[in-house]
Amino acid sequence: MPKVENDHVRADAGAVAELLREEGGGPVFSVGFCFGGSHSWRLSASDLGLAGTIGFYGKPERVEDVIDRLSAPMLLLVAGADAATPLEAFTEFDQRLTTAGVEHEMHVYDGAPHSFFDRSFAEWEDACADAWRRILDFTARHR
């Protein structure tokens, strides 16, 4: 992960977005988990023309340097008991996004651990179902 560069992520996402538009022509969203969640949110500041960006569990500090350029709507799905990123960091991030006028939604899954959507799906089935519904609603609204 330390060798991943933001510009490379943007280039890879751009290639995929271009391919998706060539093949389907519909709106393009990014989604990521953890490290990828942060990068998904960062893509809101890109020139890729994304309809929205979705991230689970990311680290807000990986996005702070581009807050003034965020333009695509963002969905933040937060594990309330995430050991990797304290809830306070997301609360502050939410406030910074609001102050900057960035269109976003944040939902916290109280008590849910980092990676609840994949590794502990059975234990967090209701939270996972809710997160999936929120993704579908978000993408439907931002088409």
Image (tube, rainbow, N blue to C red):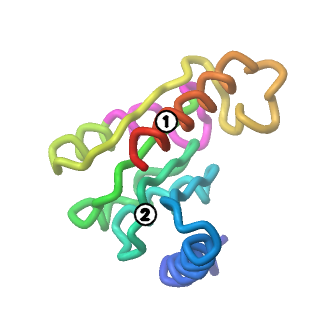
Q: CA distance from mark 2 to mark 1?
A: 28 Å
Residue 92: x %, y % from top left? 30, 39
Mark identifier at residue 16 = none
Q: Is residue 20 above or below residue 67?
A: below
Question: Which one is closest to the eye, mark 2 or mark 1?
Answer: 2
Q: Residue at x 53, y 78 (%)?
A: 14
Q: Which residue is mark 2?
A: 50
Q: Is residue 108 left or right of residue 12?
A: left
Q: Quadrant of residue 1?
A: bottom right
Amino acid carrying label 2: it is Leu
Q: Residue 122 vs residue 99: left or right?
A: right
From the viewer's perspective, is 1 left or right of 27?
A: right
Amino acid type, callout 1 = Pro
- Identified at 15% across, 44% down, the residue is 99
Residue at the (61%, 70%) spot, across then down = 20
- Asked if residue 122 is positioned above or below residue 136 in the image, the reply reads above
Q: Secondary structure at mark 2?
A: loop
Q: Secondary structure at mark 1?
A: loop
Estimate how packed mark 1 is, as few (under 14), some (14 to 19) or many (20 or more) residues with alpha carbons within 10 Å. Answer: some
Across and down, in percent, residue 121 comes to 80, 28
Above or below residue 82? Residue 20 is below
State the residue at coordinates (53%, 68%).
25
Viewer-proximal residue among 29 and 58: 29
All told, the count of numbered labels is 2
Find out whether residue 56 is within the magenta segment. Answer: no
Residue 87: image location, x then y, percent: 45, 31
Q: Nearer the viewer, residue 23 or 14?
A: 23
Q: Which residues are magenta?
A: 80-91
Residue wearing tag 1: 86
Q: Residues within 10 Å of mark 2 (few under 14, many from 20)?
A: many
